[in-house]
Structures are given as structure tokens and as C-alpha cells.
Amino acid sequence: MSGTWLTVLAGLTGAGVLVLRWQRPAWYWLTIGALIAVVRIRFTYASVMEACGLTVPPSRTRLMWARATNSDVPPDRPARLSRIRVTRTGLVLRLRLRPGQDAFDVAAATDRLRHSFRMHGVTSREIKAGVVEVAMTGYDVLKRVQMPVRDDRGVLRIPVALRDDGTVHYRDYRETPHALNLGATQSGKSVYQRNLVRELASQRVALVGIDCKQGVELAPLARRFSALADNPDDAADLLEVLVAMMADTYQVIRREQRISADTPDAEITSDIWGLSEEERPTPIVVLIDEVAELALWSTTAEKKRRERIVTALVRLAQLGRAAGIYLEICGQRFGSELGDGITMLRAQLTGRVAHRVNDEASAKMAFGDINPDAVLAVQTIPTNRPGLAICGDSSGGWVRTRTPHTTLRQAVTACNEHAHLTPEPAALAAFRPLRDVETPGLAKPVPVIA
């Protein structure tokens, strides 16, 4: 009878483990999966590295010693495994390479290591000469995005997505001033933008929105916006005002430089971040929801308006960083078919984010001039995973990320909670959105006097 109960208990335990692995992969990894993976790597490390071609022949000294002592020829040696660190999403291996090995060899074998160690994903990066860090994920962290409680956010540095290696992907405006966000309909592009606004709402920054879809995307967040344009005509005027504000900011920087022989190095600056807090203008983040609506034209008047818009955008992209003006441009396509000046503008957008696209040409618009592998990665994004994107920059590096789902209600709540932080520059007064508007057609209740 006891054997029957043990069998039933073992079956229930196994079923519970399977349910835990399916429903709560992070809990399963921290309780069971990490221990199994560490034991597997410890026992199979040498054989796996040999099978993956990551070993080197023994040194000449060891061969001479083997001949002198008439012993067996020593086997090929893998890279030294100096440390295994368990994280909440996987493992991190620290490898010390042998003479003759290269970090590129490890990077080229990551897919073979993933199959051999039975991990979900493997990436590698070189820490310093001869030291490589291999990051492994134990489960699909992008299937159900859960951002960690602790992060490394700072001034204009916000967490926006989760990478496929389990780390947080940040949008750092001071490091990458301007960015391009491409994506087809229902690809998660708007959710990415919504998450940006939600995270920026708590910072002392002026948000400027241009939403030519009559404001349906950004108007609900108006309580945290210092300026908002919902049509191309207002957008042209708003962008020219921002160019004028940029010129005024440069004059402030020039006045505060006052370089002389006795001026300390720390007080010499060429951007707003070197100014004192009293003198520093409020940084501005410009969010453009659909850039194609600003570049299309069909009449002569619309063509002149388009030239004003593109010229202002190019000026802001080229000169806006030092003045604390940052661009976040979103669209479904962003190529030369939009007219003159578009490719010049794209060249100034260092950050690149590409969600699912409908054709190869759209993927090349984002990464064709950066990395061909990223172009292929964009085309493999499935339709059933909105928010999945390829993020990169002009250095050529790229990662696969997924944005946590942010509802419009969550973004509106964050904007309402931090509405008191909304700057109100005098130059943007004409574009300030109406935040407290009575609903038309509804009569106010009249109190009854007894």
C-alpha cells in the first residue's frame, strides 16, 4: 500500500513540476532548472567544448614532457571555466581562453552550445583580452515579459524593454539622442511609444508630441505634454518654434562659457549638462507618431509645408543634442520615397528600433546601412508576438527585445499622477494642449433650491 502512495505522490510531484515549468518558468528556473543546468554543465563541459570545436592542442612543453616520461599524449584543452553565476533568467559563464583561441570562435559556436547544454539562448561578449562571458537563458524570457523590480534608471535613462538574454534594455537619451522606431500596424510600435511616455512622465523633462492622426494616440496623455500638434500645419509651426528655442539655448551656453586661463575644466561646457541647475534649460523629448504624414504632399502649398517640416527636423537632429532636444520618430516606413531630406534625417537617427514589418525594404530602412544580420532578424519576427523588436544603433550591434504590454489606461494614469511636473515654456504656449475641457453637449446640473 505504501508503494502505491509513493507512486501517486511521485506522479503528483512530477505533474506539479511540469505545471510550474509551463505556467511559472521563472519560478521553475530558480528552484529546479538552475541546479540541473549547473550540474549538466559541470559534468559535460569538456566534452561539449570539444564537440563544438572550442579546444586547442596541448602546448609543446606538455608534449615534450609526455615523450620524456613515456606517458600518453595529453588531450586537447578547452577554455578554462573560471566561474558560473546563476541569474533569475539563466546562467553566466566566465571563460578564460587558451593561447590560440579567439572570442570570435566562442561567438560563432553559441548556437551549438545552446543545443549541447540544452539552454534556450546563448550569447557571448568579450570582457577583456582573453576573457569571454557567455550568457545563457534557461527559458523564453520574451514569451511573458516581466521587468525586474530593480533597474539602473537615471536622468533621461529609462527601461523600455526586456532583452532576450534576460537583461533590461534602456533608452538613454544622453547617450543616444535621436532614434527611429519602425513597425507595421499591430506590431507593438504604439505600445513602445506609450511605454516611453509612461517612464518619462516621472522625470523633469518637457514632452512635445506630434500626432497627425488627429491626436488619437497622444491626446489622452495630454496632461503631461507641454505642447501637442495634431495636424501637419501645427506641426510645421511647432518644429520651427523648437528650432528657435534651440538657438536661444545655444546663446545661454555661450554666455556661461566665459573661458579664461583660470576657469576650471569642470565649468567649461558645450551643452546644457555642463550648466548649473539654475541656468540649465529643461530638456525636451519630441515624439512624432507617424512621420510619413509630415512628409506626404499633393499640392504646392503642402509641398512648401513639407519642406519646412523636413528642414526643421534635420536641424533638430543635427544640432538638438547639445541644446537638450531629443527626437523619437515613429512610422511604418521611412525611406527615400518620402522625398528629399529623409535619408539625411535618417542618417542622424543613431538609435534604431524595428518591430514586425511587412516587407524586406522596410527592414533595410532601419538596419540596411548598419548590419545585414539585423535585417534578417527583423523579417523573422512573428505576427503573434506584438512588441517583439530588434534594437540597435549605428555601431552595428543589435539585440532582440520585447516591450512589456502597457495599456492606455496605465499610461494615462502615470501622466495624470505626474502632471504637476509638466513644464510650461512661454515659447510653447500656443501649442499647449487643453487639459481640463468640458464635454460638449452636456448641460451642467443646476442645484435645486428649496
Image (cartoon, rainbow, N blue to C red):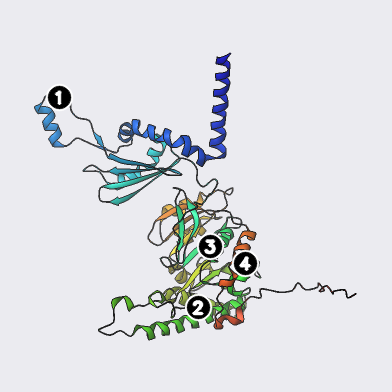
Question: Which sits in the foreground, 277 or 51?
Answer: 277
Residue 146, numbered label: none
Amino acid carrying label 4: it is: Asn
Residue 409, x across and y down, in percent = 65, 60
- Find residue 304 and report its image quarter: bottom right
| Residue corresponding to mark 1 | 71
Amino acid carrying label 3: it is: Glu
23 relative position to 53: left or right: right
Q: Residue at x 45, y 48 (%)?
A: 166
> What is the number of callouts on the image?
4
Question: Label 3, label 4: how many angstroms apart (C-alpha)?
Answer: 13 Å
| Residue corresponding to mark 2 | 312
**1 or 2: mark nearer the eye:** 1
Q: Label 4 neighbourhood size at 10 Å, few (<14), some (14-19), many (20+)?
A: some
Q: Earlier in the sequence, mark 4 or mark 1?
A: 1
| Residue corresponding to mark 4 | 416
Relative vertical location of residue 336 with respect to residue 381 in this rendering, above or below? below
Residue 280, x across and y down, in percent = 44, 78
Q: Residue at x 54, y 45 (%)?
A: 143
Q: Is residue 380 visible?
A: yes
Residue 77, x across and y down, in percent = 24, 35
Quadrant in which the N terminus is drawn: top right
Question: Which sits in the foreground, 437 or 331?
Answer: 437
Q: Residue at x 33, y 36 (%)?
A: 52
Q: Is residue 301 visible?
A: no
Question: Label 4, label 2: how many angstroms apart (C-alpha)?
Answer: 31 Å
Q: Earlier in the sequence, mark 3 or mark 2?
A: 3
Q: Earlier in the sequence, mark 3 or mark 4?
A: 3
Amino acid carrying label 1: it is: Ser
Query: Would you say the residues marked 1 and 2 are in contact, meaning their CB atoms lie under 8 Å apart?
Result: no
Residue 229, x across and y down, in percent = 61, 75
186 relative position to 30: left or right: right
